[in-house]
Amino acid sequence: MPGRPSATRRTVLRAAAVTPVAGLAATACSSPGGTSAAGPTAPVELGAANEVGKGGARLYQDQNVVVSRAADGTLKAYSSICTHAGCAIDKLAGTTLVCPCHGSEFDARTGKVLRAPATAPLAALPVVTKNGRIVAGPAA
């Protein structure tokens, strides 16, 4: 087109280099379809049953699960995928889960939101103890 400068090789390469990075950022905070992943889709062995003390919680980051134990010894498990933007929660301070993306906080014992921007609680997961090991996820 007359009067309009053509794209330089540098401009084209720069655009190509930036585009995949932008896509990665979106992928890191959400799953396909815009909904957050809920955690394991099959039972996963998390660790020894004694790893979670009464009144405490443990974050199993690799499996995106948090497990807590009530004073009576009952275990509860929740997905550690933030319900705000689908980010994997990577910090447990006491019994408070902190999302690295936007600062949402959740109670690891109940899954309830303690601090926005998240408004929905964490997804509850079935959890059992089998052969001295904690197993969480569907059909656990």
Image (cartoon, grey):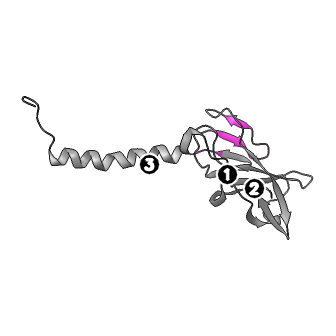
Amino acid at pointer 2: Gly
Amino acid at pointer 3: Leu
Range of magenta residues = 98-116
Residue position marked by numbered label 2 in the rendering:
137
Residue located 70% across and 49% down the image: 79
Q: CA distance from mark 1 to mark 2?
A: 8 Å
Q: CA distance from mark 3 to mark 1?
A: 20 Å
Residue position marked by numbered label 1 in the rendering:
39
- The location of residue 24, given as percent across then percent down, is 44, 48
Image quarter (top left, top right, bottom left or bottom right) of the N terminus: top left
Residue position marked by numbered label 3 in the rendering:
24
Residue 27 in the image: above or below residue 49: above
Residues at circles 1 and 2 in contact by the CB criterion of under 8 Å: yes
- The location of residue 131, given as percent across then percent down, is 85, 71
Q: CA distance from mark 3 to mark 2?
A: 27 Å
- The location of residue 140, given as percent across then percent down, is 80, 58
- Mark 1 Cα shell of 10 Å, populated few (<14), some (14-19), many (≥20): many
The kind of secondary structure the magenta stretch mainly shows is: loop
